[in-house]
Image (cartoon, helix red, strand yellow):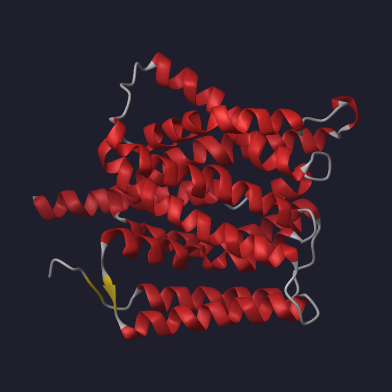
Amino acid sequence: MISQFRSQQEVMGFVYGFLGVLVFSLTLPATRVAVSGFDPVFVGLGRAVVAAVLSLILLVVTRQPLPPIRFLPKFCIVVAGVVVGFPLLSAIAMRDAPASYGAVITGLLPLSTALCGVWRAGDRPSLAFWLFASLGSALVMGFALLSGSGSLRLADIALLGAVAAAGLGYAEGAVLSRTFGSWQVICWSLLLSMPVLLPIVWRHIPADFSAISLSAVLSFVYVSVFSMFLGFFAWYRGLSLGGVARVGQVQLLQPFLTILASAIWLGEPLTLTTLLFAAGVIVCVALGRNTRINTTSS
C-alpha cells in the first residue's frame, strides 16, 4: 500500500514537473522578443513585480498565514535565485544572443539543480558524478567559445550565472515547498522581493508604451504570468512530490523544447552544431544524475 502510494506520488511529480518545464521552455524565446521593445532590466525584474501583485491577491483571498520569521533566509535564497538572478541575467543575455544558443547553455540547469540539491541536503556525490558534471561543463564552455569566436561574451557569462542562480533557487524552493506548499513558496518569495524591485523597475519603465510592439508586450505578459508565476506552481509541486533528483531530470527536455520553440516562433536556424552540443550536454547530465549519491545520514 505504501509503495503504491509512493509510486503514484512520483508519477504525479513527473506530471507536474513536465508542465513546469513546458512553461519554462518558452521563457528564453519570449524574453528575447520582450527585450526587443523593453529595457532588459525592466523585463528581468518587472515580471517579478507583476507576478508579486498576482501573488498578493492570491495570498489574501486564500488567507494564507505569514511564514515564521526563521524561514526568512531560505525565502531570500529563492528570491536571489529565481526571482532576481535568473530573470535578470537571462534578459541581459537575450539582448545579444539567440534563444536557441541560450538553450544549450541552460542545458546545465538539471545539473545545477542537482548540485544545489546535493549541497542543501548534505549528500556526498560519487567520483562518477563529478566526472560527468565536469564533462558537461566542458561541452558548454566549448560551445560558448566556438560560437563566440574564441572568447566568452557577456551573454555567456550572464547565462552561466543564470543557470547557477536558478539551480539554487529551485533546490531551496523545493525544500520550502514541503513545509508551505508549492505555490505559497513562490508567492511569498515574490511578495518579499516587491519593495526592493519596484523602485528599480519604475526607473526603467518605458517612457512611451505606444512605441512598443504588441509582440513585445505579449511576451512580457507571458514571462510575468506564466514563467514567473504559474510555472512555479507546477514545478515546485513536482519537485516536492517526486524529489529534486528524480523530477529534476524532466529538465533534460527543456533545451530541445526551447530550440524547437525558437525555430518556430523566432525563425532561428536549427544548426547541426547547436543540436549536437545540446544532445551532448543532456547525455552528460543524464549519466551524472544516474550515478550513486550517498547521504550524510547513511
Report the residue at 69% width, 67% height from top. Answer: 156
Frontmost residue, 107 versus 198? 198
Frontmost residue, 215 versus 260? 215
Horizontal and vertical percent position of residue 270: 75, 69
Report the residue at 41% width, 15% height from top. Answer: 60
Left or right, 56 with respect to 106, comes to: left
Frontmost residue, 43 versus 253? 43
Horizontal and vertical percent position of residue 294: 22, 73
Q: Judge whether residue 246 can be spotted in this image.
A: no
Which quadrant would residue 244 be assigned to in this image? bottom left
Frontmost residue, 199 versus 169? 199
Q: Is residue 198 above or below residue 179?
A: above
Which quadrant would residue 71 be assigned to in this image? top left
Q: Quadrant of the C terminus?
A: bottom left
Report the residue at 68% width, 55% height from top. Answer: 261
Question: What is the count of numbered marks?
Answer: 0
Q: Is residue 173 above or below residue 264?
A: above
Horizontal and vertical percent position of residue 136: 52, 78
Q: Judge whether residue 257 can be spotted in this image.
A: yes
Q: Is residue 242 above or below residue 79?
A: below
Residue extending farthest right: 211
Horizontal and vertical percent position of residue 105: 62, 67
Left or right, 271 with respect to 9, comes to: right
Which quadrant would residue 207 be assigned to in this image? top right
